[in-house]
Image: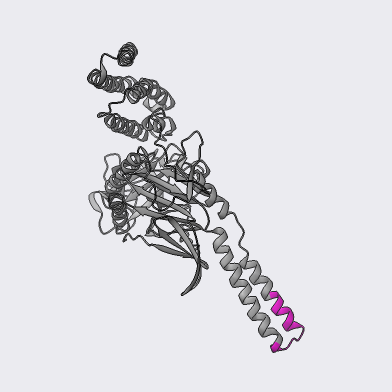
Amino acid sequence: MGFYLRKSIRVGPLRFNLSGSGIGVSAGIPGLRVGTGPRGNYVHMGVGGLFYRSTLPSDSRPVSQPTLPATFEHPDTVAPMEAIASGSVSQMVDSSSVGLLSELNHKKKRIRTWPLAACLSGALLCALAALGASAWIIAPVAVLCLVGVFCAYQLDLLSKSVVIMYHFDSEMESAYQRLHDAVSQIARCGGKWYIGTRGDVYDRKYHAGASELVNRGRISVSTGEPPYVRTNISTPVIFLGARTLYFFPERLLVFARDGVGAVSYEDLSVVANDKRFIEEKSVPRDAQVVDQTWRYVNKSGGPDRRFNNNPQLPICLYEELWLNSPSGLNEVIQFSRRGIGEQLNAALEKLGEMLAQAAAKPALPLRSVESRRIIRSTPASGDLETHEQSGAASVPIEPQSTDRPLKSIAFLQGASPDSADHAFKIVERFGSLLKTEVDAFGGSHSLQEIEALVNQLARVPAVVRSFVKRVPALKPAEGKILKAVNHLVSGYFSQLRTTIEQVERKSEKAQRLLTLVCDAEKLLRRNGKGTS
């Protein structure tokens, strides 16, 4: 699964060319081509900043995958199966993808005209033949009909396609190659499935001693382009039943029958862990068999002698990967080989870190664009999408404000656990994200940034307490969780107090910040007494 970066792509009669000034479009035959200025969606990516441009337009379709029903009929030995499914893709929108998703969903709904043109042409030719028209009449009409259908097909390609051209620096290209390598490992895995539903087992002796049952389906992995999208890079693709995940450099695109959604890598939570699985089908070549059991077991775990057809079954140690986002993504993938999920998680985290660094810096201006202007859209969410308009010099995209909520807080507020284990994993992931964000402020010398962080950290205990109350399974551990969170935040406050004193202790603003930190610590200790 190699990674490539093309300089030009073709959409119908048009060729899109990547240059220093953005995307150029040309049409015609070799040796005689007519070109225009920058068009399409242009994305410059690097540690120096992000740069977006947008405008115009192979319709490739993924191989259809069987979908799992949301409900099943079960015997009394199993609890009702619960579906593991993402929310509507219409809700999966990150701030930098609004314009692109709008264009993709709009063009996906457009009706193709070439099938209608083909039907009308066939009807016309049949009518001429029925009326007894001579071959001298039918032949030229048939040629005209073919030309008309071909033109309609080319126009459909233009009207329904979205062009995205990427330009990377060496570091970003290396990070994206790492993601390609991780997905390549998934493709070479002997067994890979998505979990559609799962349910608890009431009577384990009828289910080989398993504690839960799952309904799973095979997944396929490849590289390719989404429907209605033409791009100059190879994109890793994972087909998960009714949903398809396209791992683009700056976001995850989720394609479904009802539309297209997007999840930024900064908001994507990936949790990998080992899973013991009783395999009734053939064991994949790379699976690790760790134990044996029987299809029907007695109370002691041995074979139930009442059943004649009671074969011994292998217990394999698989790896389970949980993809989750506050916007509604919720997918569980299972691999027969361990370590693959961790590799994918590391690659996605690296991309997310680089994108966060790039978003925090001013965008690099493009060369030779003095005659055009980049207008930054201005929704309150801090959209990075830009639109093209003729005019003066280019205007770089401004860095995101530090006053927005911490991503870790947004992640916890949007999380929807469906089990106690999932809830504990979410809390662990929240702690990891919070640590990463606080560590990023370690070398900051801006009192404004420190003040914003103090205000956000003061919210953490309340946010965690609210999350725990939403999950009844966490109620027994509420005191321990809140005590650990208070201890964690208290340590961060101590670090920030030291940082403030080192930066500018004597200024009025620094004194106000120190007072703010002290008040927050007192409130933390007061609330901590109630949870101990």
The image shows residue 115 at horizontal and vertical percentages of 62, 67
Asked if residue 434 can be seen in this view, the reply is yes
Q: Residue furthest right?
A: 131
When the figure is inspected, residue 101 is found, relative to residue 398, above or below; the finding is: below
Residue 363 coordinates in the image, percent (x, y): 38, 43
* Residue 439 appears left or right of 373: left
In the rendered structure, the answer to whether residue 375 lies left or right of residue 286 reads right
Q: Residue 129 magenta-drawn?
A: yes
Q: Position of residue 328 (x, y in %)?
A: 46, 40
Q: Residue at x 63, y 80 (%)?
A: 143
- From this view, report whether residue 486 is shown above or below residue 166: above
- Name the chief secondary structure element in magenta: helix
Instruction: Identify the image quadrant of residue 17.
Output: bottom left
Residue 453 lies in what quarter of the image? top left
**Magenta-drawn segment:** 123-136
Query: The C terminus appears in which quarter of the rendering?
Result: top left
Placement of the N terminus among the 4 image quadrants: bottom left
Q: Is residue 440 above or below residue 277?
A: above
Left or right: residue 385 versus residue 526 is: right
Q: How is the image coloured?
A: one colour
